[in-house]
Image (spheres, coloured by chain):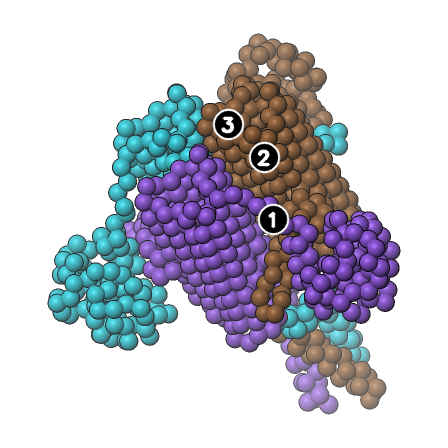
Chain colours: A purple, B cyan, C brown
C-alpha cells in the first residue's frame, strides 16, 4: 500500500515521499523502510529522530522532527488501530460447525456462525449471525450470543448469560459462575442459590481468565463498550457503566456500581456495596473502601523503596501514635512555659 | 406456593394475608405482588417500607414496618437460601456419560454419576454416586470424586486429587497442579518434583479460576466446609481449617496453616510458613506477614483518597524519619532550656 | 534403593548404616525407617533430632545432630530434587494422538510427540519431538512447540506463540491472548489490533491460570529458565530476563523489562514501561512504580495488625500533614523564644 493510499483510507493529511510501498508494521526502533510505525506516547519521542521507518503516524507537533513520511493525526493511537485493521486484517474463518463440537438439540446456531473444535453448547442456547464460538468453549443452557461476537477459545458462559453484539471474550474467561453467597447456619455454611445471571452490553471485551459472577437475584450487568483486561474478578450484582476500562488483576466485590468512563488501573481492589460515580480514575494497586461521588483521580498505592528504608519507615509507622503524644507534650510544655513567663 | 405453605416448609412464623400465591423471587426494590423477597442486610432496611413484594423473609425487629406478608426468621439469609432451594430447584440432570466424553478404560464411574460433553477422565479415576463431571473437565490419573460432587465445567484435577462428598468446583478451577518448588543449582533453576497431592473435605466449594497446588511431599488439605471464592491461589502444603471462607483474589503462600471459622476478605496476601489460629477475620487487601495467635480482626488495607492528598501523604511518609529527628531535637532543646533556667 | 546406591547416584558423601532400603519419601515429621527426607530450611532444624526417617539429605553443619543415615549436600534442596527424580520418576506416557483430539490438516506433529484427549490443534502448528499436549489444550494457528515441552492440560496458546524446549505449561494458562490495547476515539474505545506474539525460552515454567499477553507490535518475551507461578499476569511487550522467578498473583504491566536472576514475591504489582535491572528481589505485596537500577531488595508491603491499632494508624496518617505543621510551629516558637531571650 502506498502512503498516499493509506492516508486516504485513514483520512489523514500526510507529508513526505510517496515512493515507498508499506508492506508491514513495526515499532519506531525496529521499523525498516517498508514499515509503518507510530508515535503516540511522548515518552518515545526521542526514538522518532532515528527511526528508519518508511512512514510514521504521529501528532501534528512531531511532524517537523520526523525523518520519514508523516501521517498526521490528532489521535495517532486511534489512527494506528485503523491502519492495522487495514494492513493486518483478521483472518477470515468460514461459518460452520466443527465435527468434534457437541451441540444440544435445542440450541439454535445461526447458519453464518462458526463453532470450533471441542466446543460444547447446551440446550436452549442461541448463537447470533457471524458469531464465533472458539475451540474448547462451554456454553451452559440458555446462553444468548449476539451478532459477530467472538469467544476466542476455552470460554465458559453460565446458564442464561446474554452477550450483546460484537463482544469479544478471551480464553479462560468464566462468565456466569455462581456468586459467593453463603449464610452461616448452626456452625456450617449454607449455599445461597444464585438465581440471577449476567448481561454484557454491545462491544464489550472480557480478558483472559477474567471471572464475572452471576447475580444473586438480579443480573450482574456490564453496559456497552466496557473493557476488562485479564484476571479481573467481578462479583455478583456488580454494575459497570458504559465505556469504563479496567486493567488486569482488579477485583470488585458484590453489588458495587461503577460509573461510565471510569478507568481503573491494575490490581486495585474495590469493596462491595459502593457507588463509584462517572469519570473516576483509580491508580494502580489502590484499595477503594468508600463510595466516590466526585470525578477525578484517586489512589492508595504505596511505591516500593529499598528494603532498609522501607523497614525503617514501617518502624516509624509503629511509633507514629507515640510521636503525636510527644508533639502534644511539647506543645503543652511550650504553652505552660509561655504562661509562666 | 401459598405463604402458609412456604412458612411451614421453612419452619417460620408468619404474619399477614395468605391470599397471594408466590410465583418467583426478586429483590426488595424490584419485587411484585407474587414475589418473595428478603431483608438480611440492615443497609437495605429503608427499601422494606416501599417494597411491593407479596412476602418478605425478615428478622423479628423488622416485622412492624413490613408492608407485605412477613416470614419471620432469626437468620433471614439462611431462610432465604432454603426458600430458593424450594422455589428454584436445581434442574435435574440424568445420569450417564456423554458420547463425546473420553474415559480411560480403568476409570470407575458410578452408574448414577453424570459425565458431560468433552470431558476427559484419566486412568484409575473413581467417580462416586450422583456426581457430575461438567463439560470440558479434565481429570488426570487416580482422581477420586465423592458422592454428589459437582464439577460445573472446564475443571482440572491433577493426579491423585481426592474430593469428599458434595464438593462444588466452579469453572476454570485448577486443583492439583505442581507447587512452585525450585532449587537454584549452578545458576539455573532445578524443578523440585511435587509428589504430594490435594485433599478436599466434604461440602467444600471452590471458585472459578481458583488454583490449589499439590503438596511438595505431603498433601495440601482443605478440611470440610471450606469455601473459596474466585481466583484464590492456594500454594503447596497449605492447610485450611473447617468452615473457613476466603473471598476472591486472595493468595496464600506455601505451608501456611489457616484455622477453622476464619474469614479472609478479598485480595489479601498471606505469606508462607505461618500459623493463623481459629476465628481470625482479615479485612480486604491486607498483607499478613506474621503468624496470628489470637482470634479477632486484623488488617492493613489503606483506603484510597484523592490523588493530591494521597501524593502529599506519600511525600510526608518520605519525610517521616526526619520528623522524628526534628521532634527529638525539640525535646532536647526544651529539656536543656529547662536545665538552664 | 540402598543408601549407598542413592549416595552414589546423587554424588553425595554419606554417614551411617547402609542396612535400610529406601522405599519412599516423606517429611521430617512423617518419615518412617524406609523413607528418605531432607532438611533445607533451617526453620525445620528442630524436627531433625526426632525424625524417624531412614535417611536424611542435609547440609554439612547438621550431620552431627542427625539420628539417621545422613546424605551430606552443600545444596540439600537441589539434591532432594534429584533424589525425587530417581525415586519417583515421571510416569512414561507413550507417543501418539488420542482419537478424540482434533488436529488441523496442516499441523505437523512429531511422531514421538503425544497429543491427549480433547485437544485441538490449529492449522500450521508444529509440535516437536517428545512434546506432550495435555487433554483439553487448544493451540491456535501457527504455534511452535519445542522438544520435550509439556502442556499439562487445558492450556491455550494463541496464534504464532513459540515455546523453546522443555517448557512446562500448567493447566489453565493462557499464552498469547490479545494485549489490552485501546484507543479512546469520539467517546468510544477502539480496539488496537495486537499483531505481536509471545516467545518463551527453553526450560521456562508457566503456572496454572497464568496469562501472558501477545505483543502489540513486537513479541512479549521470556528468556530461558524463567519460572512463573500461578495466576501471574504478564501484559503485552513485557520482557523477562533469564532465570527470573515470579511468585503467584504478580501482575506486570505493559512494556516493562525485568532483568535476569530477579525474584519477585507473591502478589506484587509492577507498573508499565519500567526497567528493573538484574538481581532485584521484590518482597511480597509490593507496588513498583519506578524503574530500579541497583540490584538489591525492595518492597512496600504493609504487615497487617489488629484492627484497632490499624484503624488508629490510619487516623494518624490522616493527621500526619497537620503534625508536620505543628512541629514547624513548635520549631518557630522555640527559635523566636531563643531570639527573644
Using the numbered discs, state the Cα–Cα distance from disc 1 to disc 2 in whole angstroms.
Answer: 15 Å
Give the labeled residue for mark 3. C116
Give SS at disc 1: loop
Residue A229 falls in which quadrant of the image?
bottom right
Write the residue at 75% across / 29% down.
Answer: B186
- Residue B34 lies, in percent from the top left, at 21, 65
Give SS at disc 2: loop
Q: Earlier in the sequence, mark 3 or mark 2?
A: 3
- Residue A94 lies, in percent from the top left, at 52, 43
> In this rendering, is residue B112 above or below C267?
above
Using the numbered discs, state the Cα–Cα distance from disc 1 to disc 3 in whole angstroms.
Answer: 29 Å
Give SS at disc 3: loop
Residue B132 falls in which quadrant of the image?
top left
Q: Chain of mark 2?
A: C
Give the labeled residue for mark 2. C123
Residue C104 visible: yes
Amino acid at each position: 500500500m502506498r502512503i498516499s493510499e493509506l492516508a486516504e483510507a485513514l483520512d489523514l493529511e500526510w507529508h513526505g515521499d510517496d515512493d515507498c510501498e508499506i508492506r508491514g508494521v513495526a515499532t519506531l526502533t525496529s521499523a525498516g523502510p517498508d514499515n509503518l510505525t507510530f508515535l503516540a506516547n511522548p515518552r518515545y519521542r526521542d526514538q522518532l529522530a532515528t527511526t528508519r521507518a518508511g512512514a510514521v503516524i504521529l501528532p501534528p507537533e512531531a511532524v517537523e522532527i520526523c525523518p520519514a513520511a508523516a501521517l498526521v493525526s490528532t489521535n495517532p493511537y486511534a489512527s494506528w488501530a485503523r491502519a492495522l485493521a487495514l494492513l493486518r486484517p483478521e483472518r477470515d474463518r468460514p461459518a460452520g460447525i466443527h465435527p468434534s463440537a457437541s451441540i444440544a438439540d435445542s440450541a439454535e446456531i445461526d447458519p453464518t456462525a462458526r463453532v470450533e473444535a471441542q466446543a460444547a453448547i447446551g440446550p436452549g442456547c442461541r448463537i447470533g449471525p457471524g458469531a464465533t464460538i472458539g475451540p474448547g468453549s462451554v456454553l451452559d443452557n440458555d446462553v444468548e450470543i449476539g451478532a459477530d461476537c467472538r469467544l476466542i477459545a476455552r470460554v465458559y458462559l453460565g446458564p442464561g448469560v446474554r452477550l450483546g453484539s460484537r463482544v469479544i471474550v478471551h480464553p479462560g474467561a468464566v462468565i456466569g459462575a455462581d456468586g459467593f453467597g453463603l449464610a452461616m447456619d448452626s456452625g456450617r455454611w449454607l449455599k445461597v442459590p444464585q438465581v440471577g445471571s449476567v448481561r454484557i452490553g454491545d462491544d464489550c471485551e472480557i480478558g483472559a481468565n477474567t471471572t464475572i459472577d452471576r447475580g444473586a437475584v438480579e443480573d450482574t450487568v456490564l453496559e456497552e463498550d466496557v473493557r476488562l483486561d485479564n484476571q479481573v474478578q467481578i462479583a455478583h450484582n456488580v454494575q459497570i457503566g458504559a465505556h469504563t476500562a479496567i486493567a488486569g488483576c482488579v477485583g470488585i466485590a458484590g453489588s458495587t456500581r461503577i460509573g461510565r468512563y471510569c478507568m481503573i488501573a491494575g490490581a486495585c481492589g474495590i469493596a462491595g456495596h459502593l457507588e463509584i460515580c462517572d469519570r473516576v480514575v483509580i491508580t494502580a494497586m489502590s484499595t477503594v473502601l468508600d463510595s466516590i461521588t466526585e470525578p477525578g483521580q484517586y489512589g492508595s498505592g504505596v511505591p516500593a523503596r529499598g528494603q532498609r528504608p522501607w523497614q525503617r519507615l514501617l518502624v516509624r509507622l509503629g511509633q507514629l501514635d507515640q510521636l503525636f503524644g510527644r508533639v502534644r507534650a511539647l506543645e503543652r510544655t511550650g504553652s505552660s512555659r509561655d504562661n509562666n513567663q
